[in-house]
Structure formats: structure tokens, C-alpha cells
Image (cartoon, grey):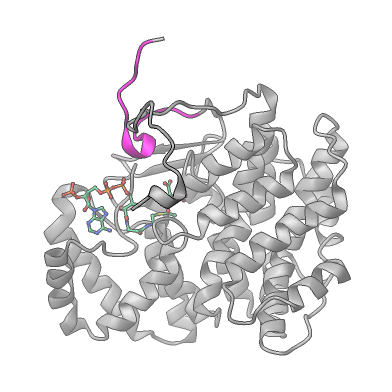
Amino acid sequence: MSVCEFRPGLEGIPAAQSGISFVNGQQGILEYRGIRIEELAEKSNFLETAYLLIWGELPTQQELEEFEHEVRHHRRIKYRIRDMMKSFPESGHPMDALQASAAALGLFYSKRDLENPVYVRDAVVRLLATVPTMIAAFQLMRNGNDPVRPHDGLDYSANFLYMLNEREPDPLAARIFDVCLILHAEHTMNASTFSARVTASTLTDPYAVVASAVGTLGGPLHGGANEEVITMLEEIGSVENVRPYLEDCMQRKAKIMGFGHRVYKVKDPRATILQKLAEQLFEKFGYDKYYDIAVELEHAVAEKLGGKGIYPNVDFYSGLVYRKMGIPTDLFTPVFAIARVAGWLAHWKEQLVQNRIYRPTQVYNGHHDVSYTPVHLRQ
Ligand SMILES: CC(=O)SCCNC(=O)CCNC(=O)[C@H](O)C(C)(C)COP(=O)(O)OP(=O)(O)OC[C@H]1O[C@@H](n2cnc3c(N)ncnc32)[C@H](O)[C@@H]1OP(=O)(O)O
Ligand SMILES: O=C([O-])CC(=O)C(=O)O
């Protein structure tokens, strides 16, 4: 094999063959199994989209009803998981709580049976069903309250908002939240999905796959940017301060959070939809001054950095949507994870079809033949 050039961040290097999603970064196109994201956002719901991603086709009415029924009936978390979460430090980040809890779930299903479709389906259902419950439970318990039991009469998204806020959500808010989950469900070979596929390739269990992906999603260069965006908008504070803030960032060569993408060189199509969803929410529930700051920042960044292909990504407007729903800032990335579980599991299943363990190479730039220095002689 020829010696390859090292590409930092593996830019442009295919890490898998995949039929799950497609991105055209020059034209701002995203498709799940060939269907444009705009169409899914308008016509589908999250569980149907998850089914599409994981099993490769839209479900029939009966398949969808069965799948929704199964997910609905696996939403409760085990007392032992709940008690474990109760012992987590309240000040800990909910992404860490989620990562630990997803991994702990695997302790209860440690007999791996990856070739058995029943095992695969159970794991898919259980992870999709319990991740929202774990997040809502941690949120309530860190504030000294008991978790709220899932509401069997509510669908996937409405139930999550119900568990979080201890009341049934407004139907528009629940539908918008569900669309947000569709938008965040999958995105080709992003860092957390790569992490999921690497973990899957060792033939470990799907709980470990999801736990490793959650850990990867949390970083501020990836899903964690949605939280950073709100912090940044608060720091900017006013529309007048947008341009001085941007100048200062550019001078310091600091990244503007929620902007830029390895693949998109135009505005992320998901950001366009999320911006519209934010506007719909503001129309019904009142205006948010940070929205004007965000729009001004988008204009200013397009003027200064548009030439480099730097435009809003999915994380730029999502926080404004979640804020309006009363979701705390440090739950924005866990909410992203609720959705992305679908994509990670689709990649887990796909990886297993023709698995080969990931084991890339490296360019060694260290020393050779170094002799051992006894500790008392070391400077
Ligand atoms: C769900 C998601 O993961 S979406 C991404 C969420 N992350 C963010 O919003 C964090 C901010 N954005 C970034 O850090 C980057 O754009 C990433 C991580 C998304 C992509 O990183 P990469 O593809 O490695 O791009 P890289 O960091 O090399 O940037 C390329 C050039 O664009 C510039 N650039 C990229 N993003 C930004 C940004 N947000 N603000 C200012 N400049 C930027 C870089 O400074 C660099 O400029 P240079 O060539 O003059 O040095
Ligand atoms: O594709 C990426 O690198 C990041 C991203 O937008 C996502 O994971 O949704």
C-alpha cells in the first residue's frame, strides 16, 4: 500500500460507504435515505424519520404504529438507573450524566446478540425510548425534585416536554420540538457518528456505541456549540455591539460559535428551517431580543467571512428555539443527542452489515532507540 499524505481531521477521507444520508455542501442539500430534509420537516415526525434512517425505508402505517407503541412502552427508566443518576453531582453537565447513564443501561443487557434482529430491535427501541427520560429525570433530580413518569397519552416529543416541565406542552411547541429532532437526527460522517462507527466496529454493544457518541457530541466544536451560541449572544448583549464583537473575535482569531462547517460552504439548510421555527414560536409566545442580535450577527459574518464559506450551521438558531420552550441552556446538547441517537443507531446497524474493525494508521514523528534513564538521573 502506498504511503498516504496525513490530512488533519481526516478532511475529505471517506471513512465508510453509507446509504443513510447525503450532504451537498456547496448547494446546501441534506437528504435522509434520499428524501430532502425540508420535506421530512414538513411531513414526517421524529419516530417515523428514525425508522426511515434505521431500517432504510419509510414504515407502513402498521409498522409505524407498532414502532411507536413499542417506544411508548419502553420509556420508563429502571429504578437502579434513576438512583444512580440521583447520586451524580448536581453541578455536573447533563451530557456527562447522559453518557454515564446510556453506558449503565448496557449493564442490564450485557448478553450481546448482534446478529439477532430481536436483540437489535430491542436495543433500538430501548435507547430511543429512554434517552429523553434520562435527560428529563436528571434535570428534575438535580433541582431536588422527583422525576416525572412518562405520559402514555402523549407522543414522543410532547412527552419529553411534559416530563421536563411537569405540564403538557402547547401543541405548536411540541410539533416544533419534534421538527427539531428530525433536523438533528443524522448528518453523514460527523465526529460523533464516526465515533459511534469506530466503537461499533469492535462489535461491542449498542449502549457503548451510543455512550461513546454522546461523549463526542458534547464538545464545543460539535453539538456543544448550541450552548455556546446562547452564551455568546448574551455576551454580545445588543444589536449595536454585534460588529465590535465580531471585529474583536476576528482580531483574536477566535471562532464565532454556530458558524462554519467542514462540509457546508453555504448556510446549513437546517439553520434556515430552525430560523423559521424560531420565528413561528416568537409569533405565538413573544419576541426574544437575542433573535435580533443573532440575525445581525449572521449578516455581519456573511459580510466579513462569507468569502471563506462561513455561514450559520445547525447549532446557530436551535438554542433560540429551545430557550423559548423553557429548556435550560445546558440541556440543548442533550436534546441534540435525543435526536442523533437515531442516526448513531442507523450507522451502528449499517456498520455491522459488512464490519471490519477501524484501525487506521498514523505518521510517527517521535524518537527511536532511546535508552531508559533511571529516575535519579532525570533532570
Ligand atoms: C453539529 C455541528 O457539529 S455543526 C458545527 C458546530 N461547531 C461550531 O459552531 C464551532 C465553530 N465552528 C468551527 O469551529 C468550525 O467551523 C468547525 C469545527 C465546525 C469546522 O472545522 P474545520 O472544517 O476544521 O474548519 P477550520 O477550523 O479548519 O476552519 C477553516 C477556516 O475557516 C475559519 N473558520 C471556521 N469556522 C469559523 C468560525 N466559526 N468563526 C470564524 N472563523 C472560522 C478558520 O479560522 C479557518 O480560517 P483560516 O483558513 O484562515 O485559518
Ligand atoms: O456534519 C458535521 O460535521 C457536523 C454536523 O453538522 C452534524 O453533526 O449535524
Q: Residue at x 85, y 59 (%)?
A: 74
Residue extending farthest top: 1
Figure disc tally = 0
Residue at 69%, 34% in the rendered image: 349
In the rendered structure, the answer to whether residue 266 lies left or right of residue 53 reads left
**x and y percent of residue 55 in the render?**
70, 36
- For the question of whether residue 166 can be seen, the reply is yes
Give the magenta part as a residue range.
Answer: 2-15
Q: Is residue 230 left or right of residue 169?
A: left
Q: Is residue 379 above or below residue 14?
A: below
35 left or right, relative to 231 = right
Q: Quadrant of the N terminus?
A: top left
Q: Quadrant of residue 108?
A: bottom right
Q: Examine the residues drawn in magenta and state their main secondary structure.
A: loop
Quarter residue 372 falls in: top left
Q: Is residue 331 above or below residue 62?
A: below
Q: Residue at x 17, y 61 (%)?
A: 253
Residue sticking out furthest to the bottom: 144
The answer to which of 296 and 336 lies nearer the viewer is 336
Would you say residue 57 is visible in this rendering? no
As for residue 358 lying within the magenta part, the answer is no
In-front residue for pair 290/237: 237
Residue 177 appears in which quarter of the rendering?
Answer: bottom right
Above/below status of 123 relative to 14: below
Whether 13 is among the magenta residues is yes
Residue 238 at what x, y percent from top left? 23, 86
Q: Residue at x 79, y 47 (%)?
A: 123
x and y percent of residue 48 in the render?
68, 49
Does residue 222 sit above or below 157 in this rendering? above
In the image, 46 versus 140, the foreground residue is 140
